[in-house]
């Protein structure tokens, strides 16, 4: 790696967002990337290692217990890292808050200049009533209290959860959303974003610096009704949108707290990102049709 490049450490590197960020940023010769992985020999980690200026480094869970351990465990010294990309896979709300705060605190202790934190869009609300969203706001507020420059990426719902091979929990979520939330509002537009475009926004945040849009980037690439989503899906994929069993989705909405919160947020508010505004900054963002066409061509 170039000694003159800015080093970016990517937490969650093999997930959708981390991978997209690395793919978007690695062609830029001004940056070198350390992609953290629990299993550097995995197929996804090895694919990242083939990209220019990317080094995959093993990270152990016990290195993430407290801020003072995080960077020394990677063999790095204070001042080595310019930026950090922080995204957490969902385990539970408390774990997401803990990990987000530890990465932020470690970044300050280690002299990192810029942290890009992948959060969520809050629909313009001070309290969404959805604990999984609010735990991200808690991490945002913690970062704001620290002496470090930041960019918050605030994406809407991922287009990726509307793919045919999406994990069952995503199929369950889209079933609740389509059949037991927005069915009351068939005219309402639902906003979506490609994970590829979240990565591109993260890369632009590092390139342009924390001054870009004041450090808060709301992200949406398309907005469609339920009927429009299903119509485009059928036109591109040649089959009806697969859903989870309706009774299971109804039961989850009635009795699973996190699903009830999720349904209430979308039933009462939903997203309202000004898409035309962000397209001025990221003009090549995918709409849902182009996203599906790309996915279909790659399979």
Image: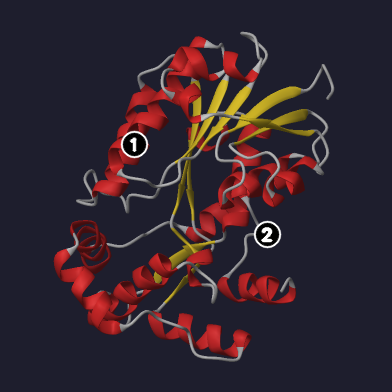
Residues packed near mark 2 inside 10 Å, few (<14), some (14 to 19) or many (20 plus): few
User: Residue under circle 1?
Assistant: 95
Q: Residue at x 34, y 25 (%)?
A: 142
* Picture quadrant where residue 168 is located: bottom left
Count of all numbered marks drawn on residues in the image = 2
Residues packed near mark 1 inside 10 Å, few (<14), some (14 to 19) or many (20 plus): some
* Residue 80 in view in this figure: yes
Left or right: residue 61 versus residue 184 is: right
Element on which disc 1 rests: helix
* Picture quadrant where residue 93 is located: top left
* Near-viewer residue (117 or 151): 117
Please say if 138 is above or below 143: below
User: How far is mark 2 from mark 1, CA to CA?
Assistant: 35 Å
Residue 285: percent from the left, percent from the top?
62, 60
Question: Which numbered circle lies on residue 284?
Answer: 2
Left or right: residue 41 versus residue 78 is: right
Q: Residue at x 57, y 60 (%)?
A: 194
Query: Which-is-in-front pick, marks 2 and 1?
Result: 1
N-term-proximal mark, 2 vs 1: 1
Q: Residue at x 59, y 89 (%)?
A: 235
């Amino acid at each position: 790696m170039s000694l003159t490049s800015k080093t970016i450490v990517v937490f969650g590197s093999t997930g959708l967002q981390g991978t997209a960020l690395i793919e978007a940023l690695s062609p830029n010769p001004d940056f070198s990337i350390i992609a953290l992985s629990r299993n550097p020999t995995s197929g996804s980690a090895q694919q990242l290692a083939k990209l220019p200026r990317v080094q995959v480094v093993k990270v152990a869970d016990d290195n993430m217990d407290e801020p003072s351990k995080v960077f020394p465990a990677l063999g790095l010294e204070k001042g080595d890292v310019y930026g950090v990309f922080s995204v957490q896979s969902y385990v539970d709300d408390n774990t997401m808050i803990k990990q987000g705060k530890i990465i932020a605190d470690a970044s300050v202790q280690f002299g990192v200049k810029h942290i890009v934190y992948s959060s969520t869009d809050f629909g313009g609300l001070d309290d969404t009533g959805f604990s999984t969203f609010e735990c991200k706001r808690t991490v945002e507020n913690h970062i704001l209290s620290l002496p470090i420059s930041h960019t918050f990426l605030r994406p809407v719902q991922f287009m990726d959860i509307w793919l045919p091979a999406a994990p069952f929990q995503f199929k369950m979520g889209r079933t609740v959303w389509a059949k037991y939330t927005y069915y009351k509002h068939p005219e309402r537009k639902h906003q979506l974003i490609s994970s590829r475009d979240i990565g591109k926004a993260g890369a632009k945040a590092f390139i342009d610096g924390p001054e870009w849009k004041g450090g808060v980037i709301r992200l949406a690439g398309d907005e469609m009704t339920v009927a429009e989503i299903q119509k485009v899906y059928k036109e591109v994929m040649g089959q009806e949108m697969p859903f989870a069993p309706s009774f299971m989705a109804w039961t989850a909405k009635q009795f699973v707290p996190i699903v009830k919160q999720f349904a209430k947020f979308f039933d009462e508010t939903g997203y309202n990102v000004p898409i035309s505004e962000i397209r001025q900054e990221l003009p090549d963002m995918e709409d849902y049709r182009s996203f599906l066409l790309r996915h279909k061509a790659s399979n």
